[in-house]
Image (spheres, rainbow, N blue to C red):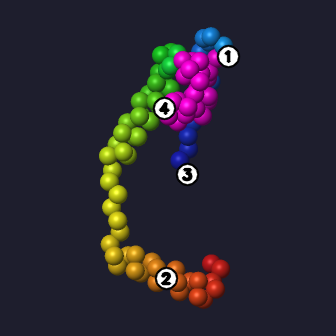
Amino acid sequence: MANFRVHPQQSVEGKGPGIDCIDIVNMLGDYLDGDLSPETAHRCQHHFSECSYCRRLFEEYCTTISVASELRDIPPPADVRTRLRSRLLEHLRSGSQK
């Protein structure tokens, strides 16, 4: 598992309680999905305008989503499915608990 270092907390005060870098990391998906309250989304935007670390994180996250959305599903070759099904059935029949 990759080590993920969170930028030291940098609270950016705005209307209401500040949002720090850890908050941004925890809320980034909800922010992009539009699931945050308008006030919280505004505080995130303010934080992005003040914190280059979180702004870069946001940009990289958006790029990753964009690239991933362009990937296409590629079904496995038929022989892979057949072999996998055979091995699974064999495992179930043997009662293995590996």
Task: Name the quadrant containing residue 12.
Answer: top right
User: x, y percentage for residue 15?
Assistant: 62, 10
Q: Which residue in the protein does label 1 denote?
A: 17
Q: Is residue 61 visible?
A: yes
Nearer to me, 17 or 98: 17
* Mark 2 / mark 3, whichever is N-terminal: 3
Q: Name the magenta segment's main secondary structure.
A: helix
- Alpha carbon separation for disc pair 1 and 2: 56 Å
Q: Residues within 10 Å of mark 3 (few under 14, many from 20)?
A: few
* Label of residue 7 in the image: none
Task: Name the quadrant containing residue 20.
Answer: top right
Q: Inspect the image, locate mark 1, and give the three-letter code of the amino acid beneath it.
A: Pro
Q: Nearer the viewer, mark 4 or mark 2?
A: 4
Q: Are marks 4 and 1 in contact (CB under 8 Å)?
A: no
Q: Inspect the image, locate mark 3, and give the three-letter code of the amino acid beneath it.
A: Met
Q: Are marks 1 and 2 in contact (CB under 8 Å)?
A: no
* Label of residue 87 in the image: 2
- Alpha carbon separation for disc pair 4 and 1: 21 Å
Highlighted range, magenta = 18-44
* Mark 4 / mark 3, whichever is N-terminal: 3
Q: Inspect the image, locate mark 2, and give the three-letter code of the amino acid beneath it.
A: Arg
* Mark 4 / mark 1, whichever is N-terminal: 1
Q: Secondary structure at mark 3?
A: loop
* Mark 1 / mark 3, whichever is N-terminal: 3
Q: Which residue in the protein does label 3 denote?
A: 1
* Mark 1 / mark 2, whichever is N-terminal: 1
Q: Residues within 10 Å of mark 4 (few under 14, many from 20)?
A: few
* Mark 4 / mark 2, whichever is N-terminal: 4
Q: Are marks 4 and 3 in contact (CB under 8 Å)?
A: no
Q: Is residue 51 above or below residue 91?
A: above
